[in-house]
């Protein structure tokens, strides 16, 4: 089974169209106002208009008020949720959309317990731990810390780029990879050549 690809931090229509043309499976839109990749939910519909219906539109939240999430879903027409804060499974489940739960790979994290705690999640997203940042660190974590007996599908994030993606997939064989800064010119602005090289790396890793 091939590794899926999610490109996060989309802020421009041309980047969304390019990602779709390159075969990306999901686009991520950051609704966390402290992020340099934040986008107003009302602009997402314009960006995603014209995309084929089988590409996922994922909204990223960090400890957001429930009403904020509901309002963002309504305005953006996203069809998948991603939670990067301290949200409980009960919280994540209340919006009637499938969701991804992000897990920060800090020392002592027990991924077996995380799989049990978020049993209803469509996948767990493993990201580099940083005291100040909720994702988008541009740094990798130690992939060898990932157990191979987890029950949840895994999405790997954190410092991925065209140079290391092939090695990651060969080592971990995740369900999906999530890239943002590794294919950018500036925060929120994607680089066409980097995106192409990233997708070539994904393809080569599964040959």
Image (cartoon, rainbow, N blue to C red):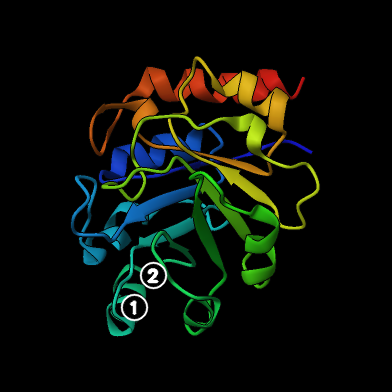
Point out residue 207 in the picture as x, y percentages from the top left corner.
Answer: 77, 19
Which quadrant of the view contains residue 57?
A: bottom left
Residue that sits furthest to the top in the current view: 163
Question: Which residue is found at the position 50% from the left and 14% from the top?
Answer: 163
Q: Is residue 68 above or below residue 22?
A: below
Judging depth in this view, the residue of 134 and 94 nearest the camera is 134
Judging depth in this view, the residue of 9 and 107 nearest the camera is 107
Question: Which residue is found at the position 65% from the left and 53% from the top?
Answer: 111
Q: Is residue 132 above or below residue 164?
A: below
Q: Residues within 10 Å of mark 1 (few under 14, many from 20)?
A: few
Question: Which residue is found at the position 22% from the left and 50% from the top?
Answer: 35
Q: Is residue 207 above or below residue 74?
A: above
Point out residue 92 in the picture as x, y percentages from the top left corner.
Answer: 49, 76
Residue 74's label in the rendered image is 1
Question: Which residue is found at the position 67% from the left and 28% from the top?
Answer: 169
Q: CA distance from mark 1 to mark 2?
A: 6 Å
Q: Is residue 13 above or below residue 48?
A: above
Residue 77's label in the rendered image is 2
Judged from the image, the secondary structure of the residue bearing numbered disc 1 is: helix
Residue 126's label in the rendered image is none
Q: Pick the quarter of the image with the N terminus.
A: top right
The total number of labels drawn is: 2
Q: Residues within 10 Å of mark 2 (few under 14, many from 20)?
A: some
Point out residue 73 in the picture as x, y percentages from the top left corner.
Answer: 36, 74
Q: Are marks 1 and 2 in contact (CB under 8 Å)?
A: yes
Judged from the image, the secondary structure of the residue bearing numbered disc 2 is: loop
**Left or right: 195 with respect to 203?**
left
């Amino acid at each position: 089974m091939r590794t899926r690809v999610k490109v996060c931090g989309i802020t421009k229509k041309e980047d969304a169209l390019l990602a779709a043309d390159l075969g990306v499976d999901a686009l991520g839109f950051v609704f966390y106002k402290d992020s340099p990749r934040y986008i107003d939910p009302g602009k997402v519909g314009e960006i995603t208009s014209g995309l084929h219906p089988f590409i996922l539109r994922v909204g990223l939240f960090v400890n957001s008020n429930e009403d904020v999430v509901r309002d963002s879903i309504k305005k953006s027409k996203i069809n998948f949720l991603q939670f990067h804060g301290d949200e409980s499974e009960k919280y994540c489940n209340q919006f009637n959309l499938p969701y991804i739960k992000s897990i920060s790979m800090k020392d002592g994290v027990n991924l077996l317990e995380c799989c049990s705690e978020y049993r209803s999640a469509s996948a767990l997203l493993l990201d580099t731990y940083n005291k100040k940042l909720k994702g988008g660190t541009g740094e990798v974590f130690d992939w060898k810390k990932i157990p191979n007996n987890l029950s949840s599908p895994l999405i790997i994030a954190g410092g991925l780029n065209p140079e290391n993606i092939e090695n990651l997939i060969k080592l971990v064989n995740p369900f999906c990879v999530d890239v943002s800064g590794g294919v950018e010119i500036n925060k929120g602005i994607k680089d066409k050549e980097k995106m192409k090289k990233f997708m070539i790396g994904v393809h080569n890793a599964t040959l």
